[in-house]
Image (spheres, rainbow, N blue to C red):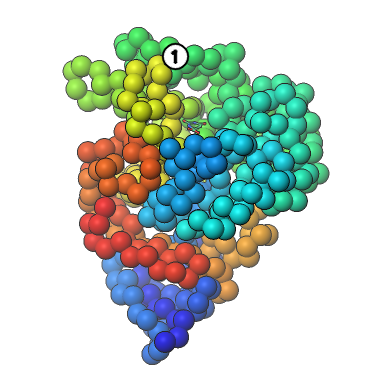
């Protein structure tokens, strides 16, 4: 038995190499060996990929794995299994864990757990401030040396402009981007839903768009002042997209991301479709789901390349974290296992441009965090690149049943919703996992 696997007859899409054609892909052990029409490999295991899309494995810049500290919500083992099932073969782990990775020894311990339990490649993101408390800087240089690919206090913004400016200046000298949760708590504190029509009708405390927009504007100014690489996490507002477009037009080194949830849903998900408001705590997320106008602007941001990446913000929570009053529910959506299907559904509806969406899940996130310098070829099907790929059945309909998630978090507002498109198989570092038709 050789280590060769031949995926035959797939519709291969490799945005980095401009490939969008019916081709074969040959994998040799842990690397891509060839992408061409009519590859002959007699001694290879053959996977018939006729009728399926084949792409580089998805790369996620924003995931919460919960370990260490919150294993009741998820572990590195359970959440990377969910990532794999969703087609994500590389993920960046946000640091809102306990302990938070704010020095080298915590990152080393985390890497040990990742090496032992992860089903996919995991890059740690280090804290910007000690214990994510926003008061003093974390050991940024140690974190960079320990292998952190970015700095973030995600879940919390760095509210002090001076501290944030200093963090940007240091991150620039280290060549590591900052991924900032842009929020002005002076405006958003206590807010649980987008401040607008739905929050007013349901009597929920509003989280205004201005809380994000103010922070995005401040963060862009400070990135310009320091020349740092700034990545704006989970944008939710039309004005934020306009500010990013303006900054990029001025040549600033700004990248950004949007979640599948904010591309697919609006504030209406909280109220639900019925006459009586559902107060669906599974639709509570920070930043909140916003208006249809915002959703359209986020889609346009992906379609025209203003927003680089689609990042899941996969945020598993325990049942009791959501089975409570709306005001007390933990924010966040378990997203890995529905992300690809929501994107395929938006493509099917003509709302997302497929070329832009696939780039936003593969090569764009790699470039945003400079991951190609850590793993050459990551996010591509180039010869010699890691054998990370995903096979999608693009028109297969299925109904989301959170009880069947492998994630410990069943917290999705998509339960019972029928999506178009399914992950059929995933190869991670040369190891093949087949899901089968309708195996959701
Ligand atoms: O909704 C959210 N959940 N937004 C965040 O920024 C953090 C995340 C979490 O960790 O649960």
Residue in the picture at 79% in, 38% down: 170
Q: Is residue 52 left or right of residue 213?
A: left
Is residue 31 depicted above or below 180 in this figure?
below
Q: Is residue 212 left or right of residue 146?
A: left
Q: Is residue 8 left or right of residue 94?
A: left
Instruction: State the image quarter where residue 85 is shown.
Output: bottom left
Q: Pinpoint residue 381: horizontal percent, then vertical percent.
A: 51, 68
Instruction: State the image quarter where residue 331 is shown.
Output: top left
Q: Pinpoint residue 439: horizontal percent, then vertical percent.
A: 25, 57
Q: Pinpoint residue 171: horizontal percent, then vertical percent.
A: 75, 41
Residue reaching furthest to the left = 275
Residue in the picture at 40% in, 78% down: 6
Residue in the picture at 35% in, 45% down: 338
Quadrant (top left/top right/bottom left/bottom right) for the N terminus:
bottom left
Residue 377 visible in rendering: yes
190 and 236: which is toward the camera: 190
Report which residue position mark 1 lands on: 206
Residue 339 visible in rendering: no
Residue reaching furthest to the bottom = 42
- Where disc 1 sits, the SS reads strand
Q: Pinpoint residue 217: horizontal percent, then vertical percent.
A: 64, 25
Q: Is residue 40 left or right of residue 52?
A: right
> Total label count?
1
Residue in the picture at 58% in, 23% down: 183
């Amino acid at each position: 038995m050789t280590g060769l696997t031949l995926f035959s007859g797939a519709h291969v899409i490799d945005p980095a190499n401009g490939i969008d054609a019916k081709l074969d892909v040959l994998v040799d052990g842990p690397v891509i060996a060839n992408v061409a029409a009519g590859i002959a490999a007699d001694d290879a295991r053959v996977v018939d990929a006729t009728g399926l899309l084949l792409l580089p494995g998805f790369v996620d810049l924003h995931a919460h794995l919960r370990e260490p500290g919150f294993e009741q919500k998820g572990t590195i083992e359970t959440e990377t299994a969910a990532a794999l099932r969703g087609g994500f073969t590389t993920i960046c782990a946000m640091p809102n864990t306990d302990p938070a990775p704010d020095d080298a020894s915590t990152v080393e311990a985390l890497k040990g757990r990742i090496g032992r339990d992860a089903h996919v490649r995991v890059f740690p993101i280090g804290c910007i401030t000690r214990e994510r408390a926003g008061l003093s800087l974390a050991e940024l240089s140690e974190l960079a040396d320990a292998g952190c690919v970015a700095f973030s206090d995600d879940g919390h913004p760095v509210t002090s402009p001076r501290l944030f400016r200093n963090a940007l200046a240091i991150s620039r000298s280290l060549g590591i981007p900052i991924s900032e949760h842009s929020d002005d708590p002076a405006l958003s504190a206590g807010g649980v839903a987008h401040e607008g029509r739905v929050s007013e009708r349901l009597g929920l405390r509003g989280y205004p768009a201005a809380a994000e927009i103010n922070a995005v504007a401040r963060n862009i100014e400070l990135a310009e002042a320091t020349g740092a690489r700034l990545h704006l996490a989970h944008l939710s507002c039309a004005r934020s997209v306009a500010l990013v477009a303006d900054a990029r037009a001025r040549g600033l080194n700004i990248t950004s991301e949007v979640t599948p949830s904010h591309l697919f849903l609006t504030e209406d998900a909280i109220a639900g479709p019925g006459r009586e408001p559902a107060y669906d705590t599974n639709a509570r997320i920070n930043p909140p789901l916003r208006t249809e106008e915002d959703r359209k602007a986020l889609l346009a941001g992906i379609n025209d390349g203003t927003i680089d990446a689609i990042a899941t913000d996969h945020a598993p929570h325990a049942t009791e974290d959501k089975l409570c009053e709306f005001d007390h529910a933990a924010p966040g959506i378990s997203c890995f296992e529905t992300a690809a299907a929501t994107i395929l559904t938006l493509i099917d509806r003509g709302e997302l441009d497929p070329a832009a969406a696939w780039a936003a899940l593969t090569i764009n996130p790699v470039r945003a965090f400079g991951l190609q310098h850590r793993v050459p070829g990551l996010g591509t099907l180039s010869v010699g690149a890691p054998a990370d790929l995903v096979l999608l059945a693009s028109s297969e309909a299925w109904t989301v049943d959170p009880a069947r998630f492998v994630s410990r978090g069943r917290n999705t507002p998509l339960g019972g919703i029928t999506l178009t498109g399914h992950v059929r198989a995933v190869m991670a570092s040369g190891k093949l996992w087949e899901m089968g038709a309708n195996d959701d």
